Structures are given as structure tokens and as C-alpha cells.
């Protein structure tokens, strides 16, 4: 019996094709699983001249093929069947097979193998033992991960009506032993994992346990919350308990939870982006931007000034008493820093902004009956969260920390966040006398085999020369795949070869100066350039193959320092050289690990001092010509591929590279889409620079109303948003937006009376009172308390502040008091003077009469 898995390439293949083609592919896989290897399936064996490893080809129909291999039997009696590619055109099989078998595979071999007899399932299991390097393919599969497909998944998929990719079912990732272990560990647990480590998978698998329990996934990131919800819904689509999962599992942001729970009508949160824009103006006037960096001030707000749950703000006296450990940022200069804090509080009050930490305090101190409670809470992306956020998470589980998972990405935990894992552990201990375990997902399913081995050797330079020990040791992989190649070739010749490099390959240089120099060279000679990144820019990206361009020889000082490192016997006492090795080996490691399948190294020198170091040299192949197969130069790239890579880079905020990809698209059918994406890239780049108004103008130009409104809102251009919705007032849904932005518009203009009227129209009575209070319109406040909130005594207080209380209001107040039946003694008074005297008496003793 077989159990089958889709590798990432096969999953991508399935995502790209129509539903009919998906079903054909799954039908073919079903035939393989059931042992129907002859007839229409026609399984053929593909292997190279050396016959050291092989893969198998099966027919889907007359024009499409799938490629697969078998693995070793797992814990059960099932043999794993790994699908490498599906729905591939017959003439592209050779190209795909090369990636797995190696560059020795070619068209001539393929033609010969088509004449050989078809393979049966029994033969295949025997044949697998004849290939000495077949285990390298298994190692590759372990390194890149795959998706587990069950009969239930296939049935669910077949039952679907025509749906978009986002609505279709999602296959479960095959869990690594590391992931399985973490999923099965007891709660509470902390999980640290970088992009690509399977963190999201682990979290969603935990959500899929016990569908009857009420669960919450919460984060600060709206996009992440939506993406996680969509993926979760795709994973449960068609399951027996699908409706129960949906009913009991919520995906929310902290902002949504707070505003909904506190019934705040106007969402005016002081976000980090809004603060940075306001602080830039404020600090420029004081000349304080260098002394008090914006991000450090933001950290001080969130981790020091507003962290006390029992009070809204810290006093200057208490702030000055804090130790350097408690508040390290402005130690020794706190008097000036506190003035910034007072400015911040005034900014909130003057503009009626909400600080998120103040909202959390209000929620924590509010009535229990109005709070949501869950049996299990997952909190993701912790890097921008504070101690108060975690208090809120604990509260949501009714103070049961055993019902929590808190997860984050170490690589995104940056200085200004104030977050530290140890600090969170201590909070668990202080509040619940427990210290949860921190589990780390170390494996990144990106680079594999020989590339991983070279990267690991570069990393080990730090252990050898800097004496830096890593908590987690990277394991060497089996030496499968192409070895990284060190080229000895003329630079002009290499540039000529690389001018047609496709969108899935990239050149990596050391710095921006070298990037500009190399790009200019390509553009001058060939009027086009491949994708070129600095090491800093390419972090977080991955490519089929990369070219490391003069990483050592481009800087003579750097080259000389490596010579000293490798040749001197006493250098290790030199701190400067230690710092050099630590920094530069990390950069080279990052560069190498951007490659998934191929790595080319080029140095414009005859002296390969770094790459000739014995432990590194043994993981490199020397070459006097360019292996075009590794770089895909023998493959024709399509406009669709450039477009897809552009979108990928755009989503990862690499705007310059994204535009370069879009500009390579020449197909008339794609021109309009291309031009739109170029403008989107420019708009998003402006947003990252806090230039929201300019970004909004671009979105307006391309009719992206949602992002236009978002940017104008972030820019504080509320009048423009108001006018936009007002011009579309015939639409019923827009009426609420008109009121929302009417409030924001007049708030910004300090026309509190007008914004108060919009609050009244929206039923936001307390918000209206706050605004009428600012202009001293106590009469309107009294009318709200009388007519809307049914609170005559509060109305009386404001009527007195307005001046002498008229007979009309005295009688109206008494009518209200009769209605609420508060006092029987009202029957004994008759004149207005007596009523007024009684009202004054009631006001001063109101709490005693309740």
C-alpha cells in the first residue's frame, strides 16, 4: 500500500492549472496508489548514464506527465510515494528530471528510455535498491518538506464546485519530527520560528485539535490574521467537523478585540506609523531627533511610560527612580525624555486619539461580564507586543496560562520592540508561578544538500576563530545536488552569459556601490540586467540559483584580513579580526543560503584565499566554464514567470527588483496588468517611507479605492476620505463611513461641535459628550443625559454648569425622576424653588439614594 506526498514543485504545478487538470493529475496518482501502473499510466524509469539514481514518469493524458519516486517504508506498512511534478508538458520532462537526477540527464537518454519496457510496482521496489545514490533523493525530500495527501483530501477536492485558489482545500504539510514534537508538547508553550520553518503549520495544527473547544488566534497584524484564517478554512474545508471548527475558532487582531469589547465607536488609534510621522514634526522643532531617536521613544512609551496597569501615566518622580536595567534608553537624560512623554499625552488628548495600551488597561479593568473568554488562545507575531498585551492574552483564557501558545520570529525581534523571550517567561512565572518552555523551529526548508554543507562550513568559521558556539548545531546534509562551483572565467564573457538570466536566479554582491557598478555594466552593454541584490537586500528571499559576485575580492582590505585570519597563528587575540570574521562569515552564510538548487561563485582574482580554505574547498567544485544548466540559461523564460516573480518580490517589499521584473514583461496581453503593478510597487514604497498622501494619489489613479482610503486615513487627510464617501452617499453602506470620517475630519480641524453632532448621529453618546465638553456646550451634554442616557442627575450637574436652571428643565428633570421611580419624596414638593432645592439635595447625596 502507498501513502503519497506532494513536493513543493508539484503543489505549485497544481495551483497553476485548471480544476479539470487538477482532477486528471489526482486521478493518475490514485491509479499509481492502486497499483495500476500499466495501461494508460505507462510508468517509465528515468536515470542518467551513471545509473546512480532514478525517478519515474507516468502519463496523465496524451500531453501531460507526472514525475515521482518512492521512499523507504515509514512507521506503518505504507510505502511513501513522492510526487515531484504534475501537469508538466511532455517536452518539459527532461528539464524537470535534470533538477533531480543531475545535469548528466539529457534528451538522448530520455528518447532511449521511452523505448524500454514499462515498470510495474513490484519491479520498482526492487529497482530502487540498485541505485546507490537513491537515498540522496530521500534526503532532498526531507530537506525541502512536502504535503501529505490522504484519500479524504482527494475526496474533498473532487467534491468541490468551481472555486478560486484561495477558497480551495489546502493540503497538510508533512510534519518533520521537530514539528511533531512541538505540537505534542504540553501547554503553555512558546514557539520561535523564522519564515519557512513551519511555525504557521504548527500553530494551525494546534487549532485543529478538539473542534468543540472555543479557540482564538490573535495578532497585531491584520494581514496575517486574514491569511491564517483563509489557510485554516482551506485546511478544514469538507471535513466532517467543518461547521463546528468555524463556529468555535476566531481570528482577530488586538485592535478589533479592544474596540469591539469596549464598544468604542470611533477608531482613532495612535499607531506606530502615525506616531513616527507626528514625532518627526515635533522633534524637528526641538532638534531632539538625534538625542531621542523616534523608535527608542516608541519603545519607552510601550515598555516604560505606559506599562503600569494600575495607572494611566507614570509620574516624573517615579520615572526618575527607575534603574538603568528597568529603563535603559534615556538613563541620565530622563528629565528631557519626560517632556517628550508629556507632549505625547497632550497629543492624544488634544486630538482624541486612543493609545492601544490605555485601551488594554480599560479592558483589563472593565466588567468581567463584557469580556470574551476562550478555552485556548494562540498569540502570533509577538515582536511588537508588550507586557500588557500578554496580560490581556492571559485574561482571555480566564487566567489559565496552560491554555496558551505564544509564537514569534526571532529574526523580526528588533531593538525598539522591547520584547524579549526571557522577559515573557518571567511574566508567566510572576503571575502563575510557571515558566513555559521555549521551542525553536530551526530547520528552514530552503537550501539543501551540497549548498547547505558549504553554508554550514562557513558558519563553523565562527566556532573555530571567534569561539562562538551556537545553541543549535546545523547538521550536514547528504552531498546530493550540484556542488557550488567556483568559476575561473573572464568577467566580460561571464556578463555576456548572464544577461539572459531568468527571474528565478539572482546575482548577489557585497554592497550598493558594487550593485550599481555591475548593473550599469549590464545596461550599457546589453540594455537589460538580471536581478542583482546586496547581501543585506536579499535576506528573506530565495532563488533557484544564485551567483556570488566578488564577495571576497571586491574589497582588498577584506581580502587581506582573510589572509591574516587563515595564515597567522596569533591572530585570535585580536578583537578586531574576531569581529571581522563574525560579521563577514555571517554575510557569506546568508548569501549562500539564498540558493535552493544551484550556487555559482565568481571572484575577479587568481587568489581564492577564502574559498581555498580546506574545510570550505572540499565543498566546492572548481570550473573553467559556466554550467548553464545550473542557472537555467538553456531554458526560455516567459513573461508570466517575470510577472509572478515581480508579484512575489512586491509582496516581500523589494520594490526596485519588483519593478525590474515587471518591466521585462512585453506581452501585449499583460501590459495593462504590468503597468498597474509598477504603480502599486511605487505606492507601497511611498507607504514604507510614511508618504501616505502621495501613495493615496497613485492608488486613486489606478482605482484602488480601498488602499486609497487607507493611505489618506494614515496621512490624516480625513476630509478627502469624507468627500470620497459623500460623493457616493447613494450607497447605503457609505452613510456610516460619512459619519465616521465626518467625526475624524472635524476632530482634526478642532471643530468639536460639528464632530459631536456626527457622534450623536452615530449613536456615540459618550464620544459626543467628550467633544461638547471641549467647547463648553453643557446644555447639549445635559440633553444627551436626559434624552439618550436617561440619567437626570448627570443632566442636572451640566445644567448648573451652564447657568441658572430654567423652570422648563426643572420640570423635565422631575418627570425623568418619576419615570425612573427613584424617589417617593418628590410628591411633597410643589413650587419650582422647592424642586430646585430638592435637586441640589439629591445631587449632593445621590449615591446614598440609589
Image: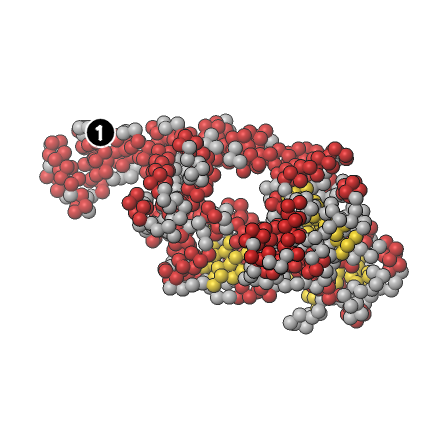
Question: How many residues crowd around disc 1 within 10 Å: few (fewer than 14), some, or many (20 or more)?
Answer: some
- Residue shown at the point (40%, 64%) measured from the top left: 434
- Residue shown at the point (39%, 58%) measured from the top left: 427
505 or 513, which lies in front?
Answer: 513
User: In the drawing, does residue 145 fall left or right of residue 97?
Assistant: left
265 or 34, which lies in front?
Answer: 265
Provide residue 419's location: percent of width, then percent of height: 45, 51
- Residue shown at the point (61%, 63%) measured from the top left: 176
Where disc 1 sits, the SS reads helix
Provide residue 147's location: percent of width, then percent of height: 65, 59
Is 9 placed above or below 511 here? Answer: below
800 or 287, which lies in front?
Answer: 287
Residue 491, quarter of the rendered image: top right
Provide residue 79's location: percent of width, then percent of height: 70, 69
321 or 674, which lies in front?
Answer: 321
Residue 169, quarter of the rendered image: bottom right
- Residue shown at the point (34%, 28%) measured from the top left: 753
Image quadrant containing the N terminus: bottom right
Q: How is the image coloured?
A: secondary structure
Provide residue 780's location: percent of width, then percent of height: 28, 30
Is 672 placed above or below 365 here? Answer: above
Whether residue 823 is visible: no
Is 708 placed above or below 454 here? Answer: above
Question: What residue is disc 1 on?
Answer: 802
Number of numbered markers: 1
Whether residue 631 is visible: yes
User: In the drawing, does residue 77 fall left or right of residue 386?
Assistant: right
Amino acid at each position: 500500500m502507498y501513502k503519497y506526498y506532494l513536493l513543493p514543485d508539484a503543489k505549485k504545478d497544481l495551483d497553476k492549472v485548471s480544476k479539470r487538470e487538477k482532477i486528471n493529475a489526482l486521478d493518475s496518482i490514485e491509479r499509481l496508489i492502486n497499483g495500476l501502473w500499466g495501461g494508460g499510466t505507462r510508468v517509465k524509469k528515468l536515470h542518467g548514464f551513471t545509473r546512480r539514481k532514478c525517478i519515474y514518469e507516468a502519463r496523465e493524458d496524451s500531453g501531460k506527465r507526472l514525475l515521482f519516486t518512492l521512499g523507504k517504508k515509514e512507521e506503518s506498512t505504507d510505502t511513501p510515494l513522492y510526487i515531484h511534478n504534475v501537469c508538466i508538458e511532455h517536452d518539459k520532462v527532461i528539464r524537470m528530471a535534470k533538477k533531480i537526477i543531475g545535469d548528466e540527464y539529457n534528451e538522448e537518454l530520455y528518447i532511449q528510455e521511452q523505448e524500454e519496457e514499462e515498470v510495474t510496482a513490484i519491479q520498482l521496489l526492487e529497482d530502487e535498491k540498485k541505485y546507490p545514490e537513491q537515498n540522496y533523493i530521500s534526503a532532498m525530500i526531507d530537506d525541502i518538506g512536502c504535503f501529505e495527501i490522504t484519500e479524504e483530501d482527494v475526496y474533498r477536492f473532487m467534491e468541490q464546485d468551481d472555486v478560486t485558489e484561495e477558497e480551495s482545500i489546502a493540503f497538510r504539510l508533512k510534519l518533520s519530527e521537530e514539528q511533531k514534537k512541538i505540537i505534542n508538547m504540553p501547554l503553555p508553550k512558546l514557539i520561535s520560528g523564522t519564515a519557512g520553518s513551519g511555525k504557521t503549520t504548527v500553530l494551525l495544527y494546534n487549532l485543529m485539535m478538539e473542534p468543540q473547544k472555543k479557540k482564538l488566534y490573535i495578532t497585531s497584524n491584520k494581514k496575517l490574521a486574514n491569511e491564517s484564517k483563509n489557510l485554516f478554512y482551506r485546511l478544514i474545508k469538507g471535513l466532517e467537523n467543518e461547521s463546528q471548527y468555524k463556529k468555535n475558532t476566531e481570528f482577530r487582531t488586538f485592535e478589533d478585540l479592544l474596540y469591539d469589547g469596549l464598544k468604542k465607536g470611533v477608531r482613532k488609534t495612535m499607531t506606530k506609523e502615525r506616531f513616527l510621522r507626528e514625532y518627526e514634526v515635533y522633534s524637528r522643532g526641538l532638534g531632539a531627533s538625534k538625542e531621542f531617536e523616534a523608535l527608542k521613544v516608541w519603545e519607552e512609551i510601550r515598555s516604560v511610560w505606559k506599562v503600569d496597569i494600575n495607572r494611566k501615566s507614570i509620574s516624573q518622580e517615579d520615572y526618575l527612580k527607575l534603574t538603568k536595567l528597568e529603563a535603559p534608553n534615556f538613563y541620565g537624560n530622563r528629565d528631557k525624555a519626560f517632556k517628550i512623554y508629556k507632549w505625547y499625552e497632550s497629543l492624544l488628548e488634544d486630538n482624541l486619539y486612543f493609545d492601544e495600551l490605555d485601551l488594554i488597561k480599560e479592558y483589563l479593568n472593565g466588567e468581567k461580564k463584557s469580556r470574551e473568554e476562550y478555552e485556548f488562545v494562540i498569540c502570533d507575531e509577538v515582536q511588537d507586543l508588550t507586557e500588557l498585551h500578554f496580560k490581556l492574552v492571559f485574561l482571555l483564557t480566564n487566567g489559565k496560562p496552560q491554555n496558551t501558545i505564544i509564537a514569534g520570529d526571532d529574526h523580526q525581534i528588533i531593538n525598539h520592540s522591547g520584547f524579549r523571550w526571557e522577559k515573557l517567561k518571567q511574566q508567566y512565572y510572576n503571575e502563575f508561578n510557571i515558566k513555559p518552555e521555549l521551542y525553536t523551529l530551526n530547520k528552514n526548508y530552503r537550501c539543501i544538500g551540497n549548498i547547505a554543507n558549504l553554508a554550514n562550513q562557513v558558519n563553523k568559521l565562527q566556532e573555530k576563530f571567534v569561539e562562538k558556539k551556537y545553541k543549535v548545531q546545523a547538521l550536514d546534509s547528504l552531498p546530493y545536488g550540484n556542488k557550488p562551483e567556483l568559476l575561473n572565467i573572464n568577467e566580460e564573457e561571464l556578463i555576456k552569459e548572464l544577461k539572459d538570466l531568468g527571474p528565478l536566479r539572482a546575482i548577489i554582491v557585497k554592497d550598493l556601490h558594487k550593485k550599481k557598478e555591475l548593473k550599469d555594466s549590464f545596461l550599457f552593454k546589453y540594455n537589460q540586467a538580471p536581478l542583482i541584490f546586496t547581501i543585506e537586500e536579499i535576506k528573506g528571499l530565495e532563488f533557484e540559483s544564485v551567483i556570488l559576485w566578488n564577495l571576497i575580492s571586491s574589497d582588498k582590505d577584506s581580502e587581506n584580513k582573510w589572509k591574516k585570519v587563515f595564515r597567522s597563528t596569533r591572530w585570535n587575540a585580536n578583537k578586531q579580526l574576531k569581529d571581522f570574521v563574525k560579521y563577514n562569515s555571517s554575510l557569506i552564510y546568508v548569501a549562500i543560503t539564498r540558493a535552493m538548487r544551484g550556487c555559482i561563485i565568481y571572484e575577479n582574482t587568481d587568489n581564492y584565499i577564502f574559498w581555498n580554505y580546506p574545510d570550505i574547498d572540499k565543498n566546492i567544485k572548481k570550473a573553467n566554464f559556466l554550467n548553464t544548466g545550473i542557472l537555467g540559461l538553456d531554458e526560455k523564460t516567459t513573461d508570466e514567470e517575470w510577472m509572478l516573480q515581480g508579484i512575489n518580490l512586491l509582496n516581500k517589499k523589494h520594490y526596485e527588483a519588483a519593478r525590474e521584473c515587471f518591466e521585462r514583461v512585453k506581452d501585449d496581453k499583460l501590459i495593462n496588468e504590468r503597468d498597474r503593478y509598477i504603480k502599486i510597487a511605487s505606492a507601497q514604497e511611498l507607504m514604507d517611507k510614511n508618504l501616505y498622501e502621495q501613495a493615496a494619489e497613485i492608488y486613486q489613479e489606478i482605482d484602488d479605492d480601498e488602499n486609497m482610503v487607507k493611505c489618506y486615513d494614515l496621512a490624516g487627510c480625513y476630509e478627502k476620505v469624507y468627500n470620497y464617501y459623500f460623493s457616493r452617499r447613494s450607497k447605503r453602506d457609505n452613510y456610516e463611513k460619512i459619519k465616521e470620517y465626518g467625526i475624524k475630519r472635524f476632530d482634526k480641524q478642532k471643530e468639536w461641535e460639528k464632530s459631536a453632532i456626527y457622534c450623536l448621529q452615530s449613536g456615540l453618546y459618550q464620544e459626543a459628550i467628550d467633544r461638547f465638553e471641549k467647547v463648553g456646550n453643557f446644555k447639549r451634554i445635559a440633553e444627551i443625559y436626559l434624552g439618550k442616557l436617561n440619567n437626570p442627575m448627570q443632566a442636572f450637574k451640566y445644567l448648573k454648569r451652564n447657568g441658572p436652571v430654567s423652570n422648563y428643565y426643572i420640570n423635565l428633570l422631575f418627570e425623568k425622576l418619576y419615570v425612573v421611580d427613584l424617589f417617593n419624596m418628590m410628591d411633597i414638593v410643589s413650587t419650582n424653588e422647592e424642586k430646585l432645592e430638592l435637586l441640589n439635595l439629591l445631587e449632593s447625596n445621590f449615591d446614598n439614594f440609589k
